[in-house]
Image: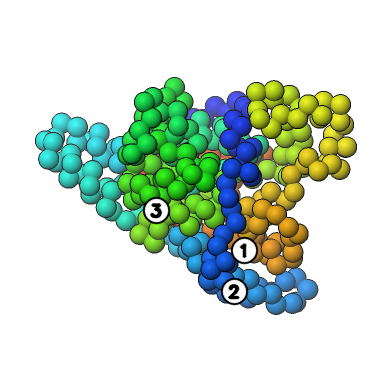
Amino acid sequence: MTAVLPPPPPPPSSFLLQNTKLKTKPKLAELVQGETTTIKTKDGKSIEIIIPSYMSHLSDLTTPYQKRPSLQKRIIQNITSSEEKEVWDTMTVRNSKGEIPYFWDVHFSGESVAEQVFSSCHGLVQAAEHGLLQPNYNDEDLEVFQTENGKFVNVDTATDEGLKRASKLNLAKSGLADIITSSSPHPIANQIFTPNNPGRMFTILRHPVDRAVTMYYYLKTATWDPLYNPKLITMSLVDYAKSSSIENNWLTRFLVNKPGGALTKKDLILAKELLKRKCLVGLYDDMEVSLAKFDRYFGWTDGNSIDQDGEDG
């Protein structure tokens, strides 16, 4: 199905609240345990960075993508089979090893359009922030439910408590989600993905100035959002850019898991290294091509994924 790309709708408030709702500060042990890598800078200096060990739960792009069977498709294929066959088939998918696409949600970068395409064009079951919308919400078990926007697993990946519940119920191992979405790579890698059920990270990036401008106009008009700021109504864009209301290096802080404090050159190098190693990147300014790239890479339409060299996998 060819994606029709309307202008991105404003994100729900949870997209903006993730800075405060998610406790991204890791335990001390997680800060010192990991892979030490030496990076040479452009000026010839060598800088050591530590990549937390749990980030290995997000696969490197240098390794071929290992597609995991889709639980939904496998059950549909066996809908006429016996009950025992269907149960066996479901357990086969849940116990199989393979990677799960992880969409790093960078707000105001076309994420709403991307999620619409995941649902409407590819029929993917998503684990995102929509889980609490399940009618008669079931807190004890993972379930897939249908909305007018697509199929979702009843989890909330936008909050700390939601991630803890998803981890406790073994979201990655369950096989219920075709794609997991969250703005926080570190909590996702640490709590949701595992060595046997790793994630394959991808995202859509937009120029940070364009993102900031969009956020300015959103926050001054989004009266329904808890982060609505009436002070911005009389504040010019230039004054907003100089104020404390503007976000501070959001991409770098989320990549290095440093929500507060001063960022250093080492933080920047770590962020760039993680993005280079772990994340398949699409561009907001080339949205249609980016979405087609993700489709081909993960094999959503024809069932055949490709590895990082573009070969059939």
Q: Amino acid at mark 2?
A: Thr
Residue at the disc numbered 1: 273
On the rendered structure, is 138 left or right of 16?
Answer: left
Q: Position of residue 140 (x, y in %)?
A: 33, 39
Residue at the disc numbered 2: 37
Q: Are marks 1 and 2 in contact (CB under 8 Å)?
A: yes
On the rendered structure, is 278 left or right of 193?
Answer: right
Label 2 residue SS: strand
Crowding at dot 1, Cα within 10 Å, few <14 / some 14-19 / many 20+, comes out as some
Quarter containing the N terminus = top left
Cα distance between the residues tagged 1 and 2:
10 Å
Quarter containing the C terminus = bottom left
Q: Residue at x 84, y 41 (%)?
A: 243
Q: Earlier in the sequence, mark 3 or mark 1?
A: 3
Q: Nearer the viewer, residue 170 or 210?
A: 170
Q: Residue at x 76, y 59 (%)?
A: 262
Whether residue 272 appears in this view of the structure is: yes
